[in-house]
Image (tube, helix red, strand yellow):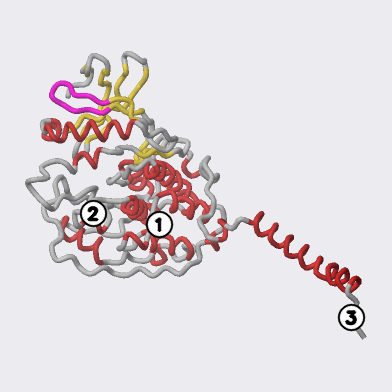
């Protein structure tokens, strides 16, 4: 679509920001509110599908109700010139995938604050009853001062409604980052988003994905059956506690992972503040049995090379290496120890001490009025 085009007599397209498998993103100007916005124009084959349009509106409304500093705000959505579009907060910066390509590995010190912010945003959505379904670094925008915002809530869920009666191997999410249950076509849960966050954390720390393959079928099998190369083989001095966290997050069975992004965020925050000893439970990750019929011909999937380039900072991203402080939200350690009501314990001990002290007093009173005979 030509730049300068006016959508719904309100949004003027300014310049193209990028192209994806399902949409083109533009920076635009909201003529009514006089502010820059980001507009995602969906592909024609999505826009022409009536069932998808209905589902898209439903999911866009749900996403518009999310208000969190680590989530890109949805302002509006509509249909014009034969295209569906969604209007979002404009976030100047780079998506995390570009940062990984530019920098290669990201240090533990810098990776943990970014991931705790991602967990905060996605965890907020989980509490609101929404699963992202397509968690990947392309959907995480990072500003020059290190603020991370997650985008594209709801779009993957809407995509799952397309041609559902035409094929049964519907896959939610992006193959490089989807969970084993998503690889089988099952509907994702919050634990599925947690798995995808684990893949991103692995990629941030090592500069490479845990699983790579030349086609979707092989990639699906790897997610369902293989354990990734341990982090310590890439980073010999990786803290053992962090390696255990990643192993737990990448477990094949959803029940063996952290249940929500909030749980993972609390663990990473605890680790990041130097309290890694609170995450000391040994992790045992079973290998799932191979799935006999992994999905074939995943719509929109094109294998993508994963170069690891020199550690050169991208332009306008000078402050990433300066991130030292934790994000501006706090987590409590997610342990049974932290849930003990110490006030009640103290009152109970005090009552026990008082009761013990009264026993000799009542014995003295009793024997004073009832002296022993003889």
Q: Tell me the crowding category of disc 3: few under 14, some 14 to 19, or many 20 or more residues within 10 angstroms, Cα based.
A: few
Q: Residue at x 45, y 69 (%)?
A: 282
| Residue holding disc 2 | 182
What is the CA distance from the residue labelled 2 to the residue labelled 3?
Answer: 81 Å
Question: In the rendered structure, does residue 78 fall within the stretch colored magenta?
Answer: yes
Quarter of the rendering occupied by the C terminus: bottom right
- Foreground mark, 2 or 3, reads 3
For label 1, the SS is loop
In this rendering, the label closer to the viewer, 1 or 3: 3
Residue that protrudes farthest toward the bottom in the picture? 374
Q: Main secondary structure of the magenta part?
A: strand
Is residue 73 positioned above or below 191 on the image?
above
Q: Is residue 125 left or right of residue 268?
A: left
**61 in the magenta segment:** no
In the rendered image, residue 140, in percent from the top left (x then y), is placed at 35, 41
Q: Which mark is residue 372?
A: 3
Which quadrant does the N terminus fall into?
top left
Tell me the CA gap for discs 2 and 1: 17 Å
On the image, the x and y values in percent for residue 307 come to: 28, 52
Q: Earlier in the sequence, mark 2 or mark 1?
A: 2
Secondary structure, mark 3, is loop
Disc ID at residue 192: none
Dividing the picture into quarters, in which one does residue 35 lie? top left
The magenta segment is 77-86
Q: Are marks 2 and 1 in contact (CB under 8 Å)?
A: no
Q: Which numbered circle lies on residue 258?
A: 1
Q: Earlier in the sequence, mark 1 or mark 3?
A: 1
């Amino acid at each position: 679509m030509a730049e300068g085009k006016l959508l719904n007599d309100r949004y003027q397209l300014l310049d193209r920001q990028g192209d994806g498998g399902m949409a083109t993103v533009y920076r635009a100007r909201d003529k009514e509110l006089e502010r820059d916005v980001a507009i995602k124009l969906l592909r024609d084959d999505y826009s022409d599908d009536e069932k998808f349009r209905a589902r898209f509106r439903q999911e866009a409304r749900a996403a518009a109700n999310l208000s969190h500093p680590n989530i890109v705000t949805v302002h509006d959505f509509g249909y014009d010139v034969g295209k569906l579009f969604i209007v979002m907060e404009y976030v100047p910066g780079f998506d995390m995938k570009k940062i990984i390509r530019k920098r290669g590995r990201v240090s533990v010190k810098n990776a943990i604050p970014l991931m705790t912010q991602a967990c905060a945003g996605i965890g907020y959505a989980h509490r609101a009853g929404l699963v992202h379904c397509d968690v990947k670094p392309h959907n995480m925008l990072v500003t020059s001062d290190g603020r991370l915002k997650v985008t594209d809530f709801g779009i993957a869920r809407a995509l799952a409604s397309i041609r559902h009666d035409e094929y049964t191997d519907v896959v939610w999410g992006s193959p490089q980052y989807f969970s084993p249950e998503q690889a089988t076509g099952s509907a994702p849960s919050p634990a599925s988003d947690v798995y995808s966050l684990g893949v991103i954390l692995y990629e941030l720390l090592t500069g490479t994905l845990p699983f790579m393959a030349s086609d979707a079928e092989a990639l699906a099998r790897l997610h369902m059956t293989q354990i990734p190369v341990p982090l310590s083989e890439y980073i010999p001095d990786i803290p053992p506690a962090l390696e255990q966290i990643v192993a737990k997050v990448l477990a094949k069975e959803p029940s063996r992972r952290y249940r929500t992004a909030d749980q993972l965020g609390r663990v990473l925050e605890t680790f990041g503040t130097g309290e890694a000893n609170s995450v000391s439970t040994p992790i045992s990750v079973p290998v799932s049995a191979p799935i006999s019929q992994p999905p074939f011909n995943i719509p929109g999937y094109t294998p993508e090379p994963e170069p690891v380039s020199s550690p050169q900072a991208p332009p306008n991203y000078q402050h990433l290496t300066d991130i030292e402080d934790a994000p501006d939200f706090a987590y409590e350690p997610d342990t049974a120890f932290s849930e003990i009501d110490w006030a009640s314990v103290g009152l109970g001990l005090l009552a026990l001490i008082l009761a013990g002290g009264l026993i000799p007093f009542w014995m003295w009173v009793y024997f004073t009025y009832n002296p022993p005979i003889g």
